[in-house]
């Protein structure tokens, strides 16, 4: 079992999305690299190494056999943490991301947490609105993503949660597990 977060009586249902295989990873990392700043991702080797962790899953959507979107998630006993979610830039705006995330939300009866950039420009505001339309809540307490690679600094981000907002005390009590598990593998 993976470490637990305390949050009521939620359960996990089996996922309906396709789980990525190791041979899918180069394409996933290609999409990840074009979608996220270096400060919000691990090195290629560090990210690849996570595939061996029992709590870490990557789900993919394909078109004509080619991966066009992915969702990388830490699935703990009582909460899921979406670490990365991206659609290939040539397929954005067609509803693929919404559909994929709705499918994932339908697989879990557990709370879901994700990080977003603070609402400081048009792109970050649009991203937050995208998640809000799907039922996520923006929690306004302060949060810093720990460094994911040696030499990086912590990144100020915001936390969004589904299906309900959480208070800072709840998040602080439980983020220790995520830090120990999700952020311990950045040295690759």
Image: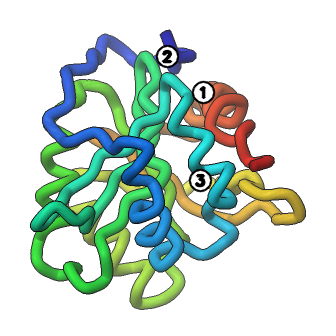
- Whether pointer 1 and pointer 2 mark residues with C-beta atoms closer than 8 Å, the reply is yes
- Spot the residue most to the bottom: 122
Q: Is residue 45 left or right of residue 53?
A: right
Q: Dot 2: few (<14), some (14–19), or many (≥20) neighbours within 10 Å?
A: few
Residue at which label 2 appears: 6
Q: Is residue 13 above or below residue 124?
A: above
Q: Which of labels 1 and 3 is toward the front?
A: 1
Mark 1 or mark 2: whose residue is earlier in sequence: 2
Asked whether, in this view, residue 89 is left or right of residue 149, the answer is left
Q: Tell me where residue 78 appears, x and y as whole percent.
A: 41, 19
Looking at the image, which residue is at 67% across and 49% down? 46
Camera-nearest residue between 74 and 132: 74
Percent across and percent down for residue 69 are: 28, 63
Q: Residue at x 67, y 52 (%)?
A: 45
Disc sitting over residue 174 in the figure: 1
Which label's residue is closer to the chain start, 3 or 2? 2
Q: Which residue is mark 3?
A: 141
In the structure shown, which secondary structural element does the residue marked by tag 1 occupy?
A: helix
Q: Is residue 149 left or right of residue 182?
A: right
Residue farthest to the right?
151
Mark before the other along the chain sequence, 1 or 3: 3
């Amino acid at each position: 079992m993976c470490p637990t977060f305390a949050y009521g009586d939620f359960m996990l249902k089996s996922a309906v999305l396709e789980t990525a295989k190791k041979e899918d990873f180069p394409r996933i990392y290609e999409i990840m690299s074009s979608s996220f700043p270096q400060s919000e991702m691990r090195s290629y080797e560090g990210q690849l190494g996570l595939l061996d962790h029992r709590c870490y899953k990557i789900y993919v959507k394909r078109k004509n056999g080619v991966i066009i979107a992915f969702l990388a998630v830490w699935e703990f006993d009582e909460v899921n943490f979406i670490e990365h979610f991206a659609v290939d830039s040539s397929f954005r705006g067609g509803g693929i991301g919404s559909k994929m995330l709705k499918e994932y939300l339908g697989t879990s009866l557990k709370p879901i947490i994700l990080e977003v950039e603070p609402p400081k420009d048009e792109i970050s505001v649009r991203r937050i609105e995208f998640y809000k339309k799907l039922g996520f809540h923006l929690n306004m307490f302060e949060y810093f993503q720990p460094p994911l690679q040696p030499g990086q600094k912590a990144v100020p981000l915001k936390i969004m949660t589904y299906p309900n907002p959480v208070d800072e005390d709840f998040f602080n009590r439980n983020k220790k597990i995520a830090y120990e598990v999700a952020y311990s593998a950045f040295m690759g």
